[in-house]
Image (cartoon, grey):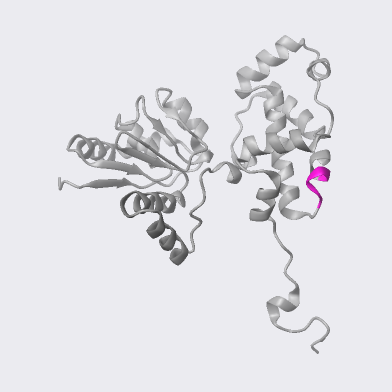
Amino acid sequence: MRPVDVLIVPGFESSPTTGLEATIADLGPEVSAIRSQAAAGAAVVSICVGAFLVAEAGLLGGREATTSWLFADRFARRYPDVRLRPKSLVVTDRGVTTTAAFSAMYDFALQFIREHDGPRVARGTARIALLDDARSTQAPYVDAELIPTLGREFSLSVKRWLDQNLDTRYDLSTLAQEFHVSTRTMLRRFGHEAGESPLAYLQTVRVRRARHLLETTDKTVANVAADVGYHDPGTFSGIFARHTGQRPREYRAKFHRHRVPKSAITGVPSSLHLP
């Protein structure tokens, strides 16, 4: 096998609902090659779900790593000895680098240039390539609705109730009464099935709804906060930033979908009517 300086491990075709185990099993020769190149001294970089192959090769045990947010839960369950940082775009730990979804390869490339040639060259490269050189987290791009949910009826029922009462003040006792269980049982059963508390889930859903409103409407931040159940904009702003890595106004500035007048697209003044 020809020695290399840096081994780039690409992602592979998969989806959150397909049999990942079978796919990985079919890639056994690739896993062996990754292990051999690492043993020979090559630096290893994975793109997106390529992190699964690097982990299979035994290179991530005890290391920090990241992967696509869409597969982060499955990765964490399969490799509990890896210190997963699911919000990070690029993670390097002792010679092994992992990146988030496939576009994060550009973030890695810019980081590589920055480390070897300095920030000025990296910034110039980003401008030429039309890349955002200020990205630091994949959190703003996460859409929990795209993450498959296992068929756990109790937590799914609770989630549906919380979804339907998004702007209602959260009260654990009221929630428990709604499902005829004690507060202790509510926390235990929901936590066992969903891996988080009902409040944590509610905050995630509220932030997701707020993101949609910030992207698609001109409502003030205070009004958006109220629409998703927060009467204190400061509290809302703090929770939103914790989930997305950006304050609401910063998020809107980056992701708001401005309506483009038809005349601006066609070049025809809006006052003219074509036959």
What residue do we see at 71% from left, 25% from top? 199
What residue do we see at 15% from left, 48% from top? 2
Residue 266 picture quarter: bottom right
Q: Where does residue 101 sit, x and y in percent of width and height?
A: 47, 46
Q: Nearer the viewer, residue 194 or 104?
A: 104
Q: Where does residue 112 sit, x and y in percent of width and height?
A: 35, 50
Q: Nearer the viewer, residue 54 or 271?
A: 271
What residue do we see at 77% from left, 34% from top? 163
Q: Say left or right for 112 vs 254.
A: left
Residue 272 picture quarter: bottom right
| 114 relative to 88, above or below | below
Q: Say left or right for 4 vs 169.
A: left
Give the extent of the magenta segment: 219-223
Residue 120 picture quarter: bottom left
Q: Main secondary structure of the magenta part?
A: helix
| 252 relative to 137, above or below | below
Quadrant where the image shows the N terminus:
top left
Quadrant where the image shows the C terminus:
bottom right
Q: Say left or right for 57 vs 88.
A: left
- Whether residue 129 is in magenta: the answer is no
| 188 relative to 170, above or below | above
